[in-house]
């Protein structure tokens, strides 16, 4: 569904409030490219998702721990190093998946707790949601952590357009640094005509736009 600009801004604001703490900064250890990861609450458990090829090819991936996602304050380190071997890769979808049970166990051992939100499976786009998107562009809202000149990673929103590309989706615009691996959201009607928020998938690297990996293929694919 293509929304009016005011409606797009309202959806973007609500996403920041509801899911801002589901978004985490990630980069390969060393001098790798910055990206975004996010928490996804699937019926089989909670997972951390990101783009596989760009962000988790190194032996260690570093997750930034913003003060808002841990408690008590000042206990957790600024960076959490995650071995690349912990991630499961979905080569057909371009996404890396990490169950979060080990992350919660690690936090408990170190004396802190996660204070996060997760993208719920209830709003994950299904195959029929994607099928209903045609050649005409629809509103696509990306919730990510950008990259400033000083290296800080602020929570940002990009309002883009998505179109069908084969049996999947593609964002038509180029995204700023740090956005690969982020979740993409849209608003659409289901088969019964009910309009609601949908998480369309995961931003993948690309030129002249970005492919979107569908969530229904990520955990079970």
Image (cartoon, helix red, strand yellow):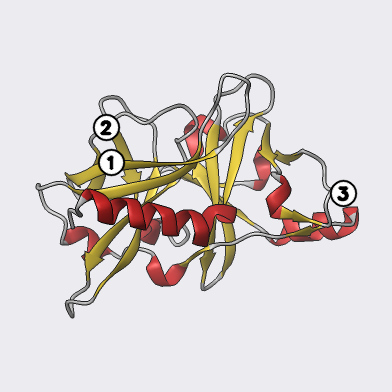
**Which numbered circle lies on residue 160?**
1
Determine whether label 2 and label 1 are within 8 Å by CB.
yes
Q: Is residue 153 above or below residue 43?
A: above
Residue 75 numbered tag: 3
Please determine whether, in this image, residue 78 is positioned above or below residue 38: above
Q: In the picture, residue 200 is in which quadrant? A: bottom left
Tell me the residue at 51%/58% (across/down): 17
**What SS does tag 1 mark?**
strand
> Does any portion of residue 214 appear in the rendered image?
no
- Residue drawn 39% across and 57% down? 215
Distance from disc 2 to disc 3, alpha carbons, whole Å, reads 40 Å
User: Could you tell me how many numbered marks the image carries?
Assistant: 3
- Residue hosting label 2: 173
Decide which of tag 2 and tag 3 comes sooner along the chain: 3
Please identify the quadrant where the N terminus is shown.
bottom left
Q: CA distance from mark 2 to mark 1?
A: 7 Å
Disc 2 crowd, CA 10 A, few/some/many (<14, 14-19, 20+): some
x%, y% of residue 75? 87, 49
């Amino acid at each position: 569904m293509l929304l009016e600009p005011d409606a797009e801004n309202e959806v973007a604001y609500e996403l920041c409030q509801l899911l801002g703490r589901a978004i985490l900064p990630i980069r390969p250890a060393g001098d790798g490219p910055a990206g975004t990861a996010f928490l996804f609450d699937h019926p089989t458990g909670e997972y951390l998702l990101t783009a596989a090829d760009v962000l988790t090819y190194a032996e260690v991936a570093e997750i930034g721990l913003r003060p808002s996602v841990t408690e008590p304050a000042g206990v957790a380190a600024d960076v959490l190093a995650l071995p690349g071997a912990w991630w499961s890769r979905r080569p057909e979808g371009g996404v890396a998946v990490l169950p979060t049970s080990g992350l919660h166990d690690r936090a408990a051992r170190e004396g802190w707790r996660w204070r996060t939100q997760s993208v719920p499976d209830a709003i994950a786009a299904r195959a029929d949601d994607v099928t209903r998107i045609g050649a005409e562009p629809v509103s696509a809202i990306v919730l990510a952590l950008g990259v400033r000149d000083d290296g800080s990673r602020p929570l940002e929103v990009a309002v883009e357009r998505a179109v069908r590309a084969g049996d999947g989706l593609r964002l038509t615009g180029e995204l700023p640094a740090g956005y690969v691996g982020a979740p993409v959201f849209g608003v659409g009607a289901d088969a019964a005509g009910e309009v609601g928020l949908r998480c369309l998938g995961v931003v993948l690297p690309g030129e002249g736009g970005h492919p979107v990996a569908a969530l229904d293929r990520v955990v079970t694919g």
